[in-house]
Image (spheres, grey):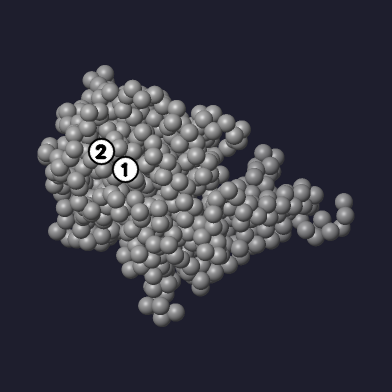
Amino acid sequence: MIPPPPLMFACYLSGAAVEFVFIYFLTLYCLRSSKKVVRFLTLPLILAFSAVYFSQSYTLRQSGNLIDVIALENVHHFMLVLTDKLKRKLIQFGALFIAFGVIFAFAAKSEQNKKAKKILIVSGALMLLQLPFASALPSLSPAVDLAAKASHLAAPLATAYRFRNRTPDFMKQNAFEAPFPFERTETARKPNVFIFFTEGLSARTLGAYNPRFRGVTPHLDALAERSMKVENYYNHTAATEKGVLGQLTSFYPARTRDFHPEVMQTPDIPSDNYRSLAHILNENGYETYFLMASTGITDNLPNIAEKAGFRHVVGTEELRAALKNGKSGNMSDEEFFKAAEAFLKTLPDDKPVFAAFYNLETHAFTDTAPDGIKYGDGTNRVLNTVANFDRQFGKFFDWFERSRYAKNTYLFFTSDHAHFFEPPFVSLMKSEKDYKPVFVDRIPLLIYAPSVKQPKTLDAKGRNSLALAPTVLHYLNVKKAENHFVGHSLLETAPKDFNVSETGLIFFFTDESGLHEEKDVPEEKKAEWQKAKENVMFCIYSDIRGQITRRTRAED
Amino acid sequence: MPKIFNVINRERLCAAFLLFNFGYFASQAVKTFNDPTPPPYVRLLLIRSGR
């Protein structure tokens, strides 16, 4: 259990004090050592330790918490959170580190003194004493905390031991069981499918879900009016790579691959590890495209899209070829939607199209690009980016309605995950009683299907984005499809009355009554909850081992 | 070697640098708890505990 803030506050400071004393005496020990190698280590040691503390100090002020596991998992996204403020801080601290290094080089050397060794032992023992408390008081000491969280990334290795006698058995032959519940006009051709994975969009920022923001998202609200709006629907994982892959495969994917210790040893995940929506639609005569606004330098998305079976991974270069504007780097939402329109116009009309879209500008810690708009006085970057996205999406949708896709396309509008709990978002939502500053929240799902007589709203009752892939197949009536989906179509009854979301190995419970942290799981549900959590760990572990599909298992 | 570098020996320099870092961490922690803009639940708990 996490202690209340004043106690945690005392823990941060006392734990930090012990760490600083330890590092100081370790420094003295190094400086006074008779060995040149040890003396040489002093400067790197003190700079590395200070860099850890600088990062923890900055994160604490920005998020109210020390660096968390999800940040470590997404450390390669660093360029996306590099705000002007952080740039200034990095320059200031860089200058300080350089100044320190230069003065250190010229300063007088130490005289030999035996005392340091004794004090080093005492403070080292104090440091070790902190370790047993680390699980009870998670932030007892900020440097140990970071080390513990980094080692947390190895948790699937512990899972490997627990699951050593268990064989993956995820495969099913049907994507859903119940008949399609709504009336629909049969079309001569298979409908196209467009899925919008909007970057980090929570349902509570859309006017259609939250009347406070009606003025911010008029175009999306208009789309919601004409669609079936799914309510009380949550993201089942985060961040982007896990969110997108997890939804396409209806699975709890492994943590970001290039940071996981075991994956670093076995980087070649078998290409037939997943059975995603794209694989199934490829087999059903579709041409599959993933259009993305990111270059793949700040994320691993092109690789993810390829592993998820898309025949065409349409990155910024391909999109800009359609636009012919000669720009480079990640795309703004305005540029992305213009390019998407130009690209879709060029596609041949001989096959049904499955296109997934991923924009970038609504990402946490970013503001709108110069070609975008600001909302109101422009001071809240979350409102700026959401309002700008709405405007650009609106223009795209206007074109879509006039295009050849209009009459025979099912459009699923959702997001990759909830909005990250960055300060401008939390300050915007702090008046909302059901908001919790965590990485799981209600996300939008608007299903636009003009040929289907569907109700205006559907209550998902706490179900999550594991349901997306089976729901899409339910709309397309593709029932026979070998799959390893963990989720179930929203158009059939859920087997359980609660659902599990996982972000950075922190687990959340969602049901009809909302989102709950693990400590709030009701007593009578605890046994079932433990089993469900263990299954999530098994999914993550099986993905790391590349053992999800039957074919891979047979090869083993 | 200028005299000043005899006063600023490496041990004192390291002590000052670490002290500055600790001071910065402590100041950020104090600011976070006194102005809990980020997580609203922190503010609620502080009020409850009488601050």
* Residue occupied by mark 1: A412
Front residue of this view, candidates A295 and A207: A207
How far apart, in angstroms, are the residues tagged by discs 2 and 1? Answer: 8 Å
- Secondary structure of the residue carrying tag 2 is helix
Residue A30 horizontal/vertical position (percent) = 65, 48
Question: Is the residue A322 above or below the residue A55 in the image?
Answer: above
Residue furthest to the front in view is A402
Residue A327 horizontal/vertical position (percent) = 60, 35
* Residue occupied by mark 2: A472
Front residue of this view, candidates A327 and A430: A327
Front residue of this view, candidates A290 and A156: A290
The residue shown at (44%, 43%) is: A396
Question: Is the residue A162 above or below the residue A48 in the image?
Answer: above
Q: Is residue A204 in view? A: no
Residue A551 horizontal/vertical position (percent) = 25, 21
Say what amino acid the circle numbered 2 marks. Val
In the displayed structure image, the side of residue A551 where residue A83 appears, left or right: right
